[in-house]
Amino acid sequence: MIDAKLLEVRKAVKRRKPNFQIQNSNDPKKRWPGRWKRPKGLQSKMRERRKGNPRYIEPGYGSPAALRGATTEGLFPVVVSNVSDLDNMNGDSGVVVSSTTGMRKKAEIVRAAVGRKLKLLNVNAAEFIKGVEESIGSRKKRRHELLQKRKFRAESKKPQPAQATAATSATAVKSDVKPANAKGDIESKVDDEERKKAEKAEKDKILTKRSD
């Protein structure tokens, strides 16, 4: 465990630590917040540590070496990508869930960390689990509605009993009409052939009489 006295020492050091600036940082073209650059000019007053100039970074402003990289609570962040990575955690470590982890695996890691009473640094466990449950519920509801729509469409495409009966009766009527029409066509063809034969016979008789 990290000594509480070291945390107090670091707090005291940070309270008196100045905001280190870039040389000529009042120039808007060189004013980059949160950045420090070592002065290199031959006549630089800041490089020579002269009074009235921005402070120069020196070892005396550093925090205790035992707390380098630790959070304000004294926990060292450890990036976790799956549940098995939690086995290497101890009381001085804080869980940082990897940003490339999917929602399902991330939920498993959060639940496992809460069960093992580990500190989560980049995730609010209660809000995250609540959001996951709501998301899963909305997905299930949307999937159920989609299945209902597909089922309704499939049932609407099926022929109803009354429509099926009407279709079969219409087919039966058509099948009855077709043979009758076919029979009438055959009889008319036979009558035409007989009439043609009779006319030919009459013509033959007339020609034979004339030849006599």
Image (cartoon, rainbow, N blue to C red):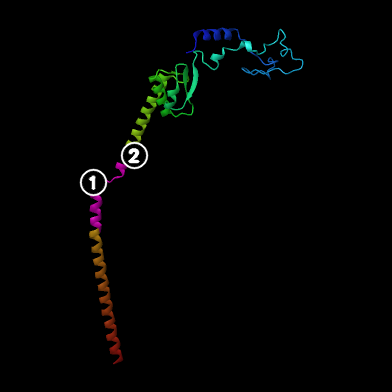
Relative depth, front residue between 4 and 102: 4
Q: Which mark is residue 72?
A: none
> How far is the residue under mark 2 from the one under mark 1?
23 Å
Percent across and percent down for residue 83 are 42, 26
Magenta stretch encompasses residue 160: yes
Rendered residue at 44%/25% (across/down): 85
Of helix, strand and loop, which one carries label 1? Answer: helix
Which residue is pictured at 28% across the width and 77% down the height? 196
Element class at badge 2: helix
| Quadrant where the C terminus is found in the figure | bottom left
Q: Nearer the viewer, residue 112 or 153?
A: 112
Residue toward you, 78 or 149: 78
User: Which amino acid does the dot numbered 1 rest on?
Assistant: Ala
Q: Nearer the viewer, mark 2 or mark 1?
A: 2
Look at the picture and state if 150 lies above or below 165: above
The three-letter amino acid code for the residue at tag 2 is Arg
- Specify the farthest residue to the bottom: 212
Q: Could you tell me residue 150's position as x and y percent?
A: 34, 39
Identified at 49% across, 8% down, the residue is 4
Q: Residue furthest right?
A: 43
Q: What is the quadrant of residue 197 in the picture?
A: bottom left
Residue annotated with mark 1: 162
Residue 150 shows which numbered tag? 2
Q: Is residue 126 above or below residue 206?
A: above
- Our reading of the magenta stretch's main secondary structure is helix
Instruction: Tell me the crowding category of disc 2: few under 14, some 14 to 19, or many 20 or more residues within 10 angstroms, Cα based.
Output: few
User: What segment is highlighted magenta in the picture?
Assistant: 149-174
Q: Earlier in the sequence, mark 2 or mark 1?
A: 2
